[in-house]
Amino acid sequence: MEIFIQVVYFVAAVLFILGLKKMSSPVTAAGGIAWAGVGMVAASIVAFFEPGVFDYSSNVFLIVLAIAVGSALAYVTAKRVEMTDMPQMIAIYNGMGGGAAAAIAAVELARLAGGHHEMAAVNQVLAVVGALIGAISFSGSAIAFAKLQGLMKKTIRLPMHMVINLGLFALTLIAGAIIGFGHDVSIQLVIVFFVMALVFGVLFTTPIGGADMPVVISLFNAFTGLAVAFEGFVLGNAAMIIAGTVVGSAGTLLTQLMAKAMNRPISGILFSSFGNAGGSGAEEAVEGSMKEIQAADAGIMMAYANKVIIVPGYGMAVAQAQHKVQELTQLLEERGVTVKFAIHPVAGRMPGHMNVLLAEAGVEYDKIFDLDEINPEFPTADVALVIGANDVVNPVARTNPDSPIYGMPILDADKARNCIVIKRGKGSGFSGIENHLFYADNTRMLYGDGQKAVSELIASIKEL
């Protein structure tokens, strides 16, 4: 039986890895999710045959009940959630994974403190490490969810916030070391340790601005993977070790890629508010003025263009305008216009946010290009249509060394012959700085909700 269990775990691990590989492409992502899902089902079923599971009938009842309740909740929420709310769902589900790992550690450490369980020295240390990482991921992901859901609309930075965080983290490490290397573990200390870890996760995340949420979600994803891997060692569960390691390494790589896409060190994202680097007066004066355009005129400009590049941003997601954008694309292509989509790595609220929305609307994959692929084409585009994007198209990232976003790779929308920006108002983006693209001579502003504005463009083109 033991050999059978380990073989199933090995097959499940292979399915996890192959599934993750297939998720790297939009074309094969759906199949990758299915493969990984089969692996998870297999690992969950074979876990019932682990020694000791059937020692008490209440064990099986509680396990089945938890699976049933969790599956039902997941099914209902997944069916109801809008695609625009996918980042929030990812954040909260990721937090649940970290919380589950922390809960496993809590049970093992509580049994150890109560004298009902003995652990190898290395497992005792790994349980503490997994508990720390999992608890931070759980509470931090909850704050990320609150920010993305709009429940927490401002960053919170306490006086001497960094000092408080460092002090709390040091105390948490000390408590963890006492538990991890101690022979007579106190249940009270275990409780204090978990409380401090959870509070640290909250204080760690509250100062981070919304623009950095894609990186934070990726980081917490890595945290969750590591926590699961550590607890897999504690339980001797190969599937948890492999799955956690794969998720942890993938999350770490994604975090590095997202930080690189913003040209900011990870430390700068985690330990400072976005946009504070330049300080007051760091921004150069804006020349020119915003020039408004009506939908009828913008529609004519696009209808008689040879090439149009569409730059979607979070404003498109908020307005749920992706289906109208696809309708606009089809209408332009019927008139012989070449339409392409330019996707910035940090557009939206999570990695791949814009790709998911466009895929949902039926935009073909071969029309979607990343920053490096599409930037050389902007000078040959007759129109760049920017929908709800801000900082990722701000040219000061190339020109002003004093700007907080200086050096961040941007989409070269300003190099198109004409640029039309759909925007709800005249405010700045998440970085809090003015976008000089809006004042450029070749830029026109089409104010209004993204879906309404695109609908007006479609109506104007149909009238031609």
Image (cartoon, helix red, strand yellow):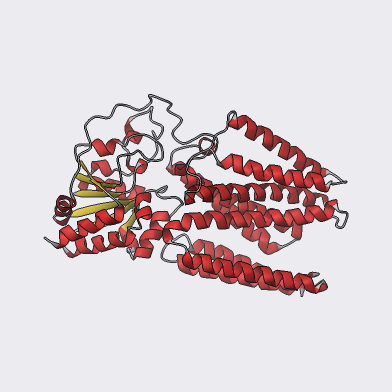
What x and y, as percent, mark residue 388? 33, 48
The quadrant in which residue 198 appears is top right
What x and y, as percent, mark residue 117? 85, 57
Rendered position, 375 above or below 396 = below
Q: Which of 248 and 74 is in front in this view?
A: 74
- What is the residue that sits farthest to the front in this orientation? 151
What x and y, as percent, mark residue 268? 51, 35
Q: Nearer the viewer, residue 377 or 330?
A: 330
Would residue 43 be visible to someone looking at this image?
Answer: no
Would residue 205 be visible to someone looking at this image?
Answer: yes
Query: In which quadrant is the C terminus drawn?
Result: bottom left
- What is the residue that sits farthest to the left in this orientation? 464
Using residue 121 as the reference point, say whether residue 464 is left or right of it: left
Q: Nearer the viewer, residue 63 or 343?
A: 63
* Residue appearing at x 57%, y 58% in the figure: 93
* Residue appearing at x 35%, y 35% in the figure: 397
Q: Which of 303 and 36 is in front in this view?
A: 303
Using residue 193 as the reference point, say whether residue 80 is left or right of it: left
Using residue 36 as the reference point, say whether residue 405 is left or right of it: left
The quadrant in which residue 51 appears is bottom right
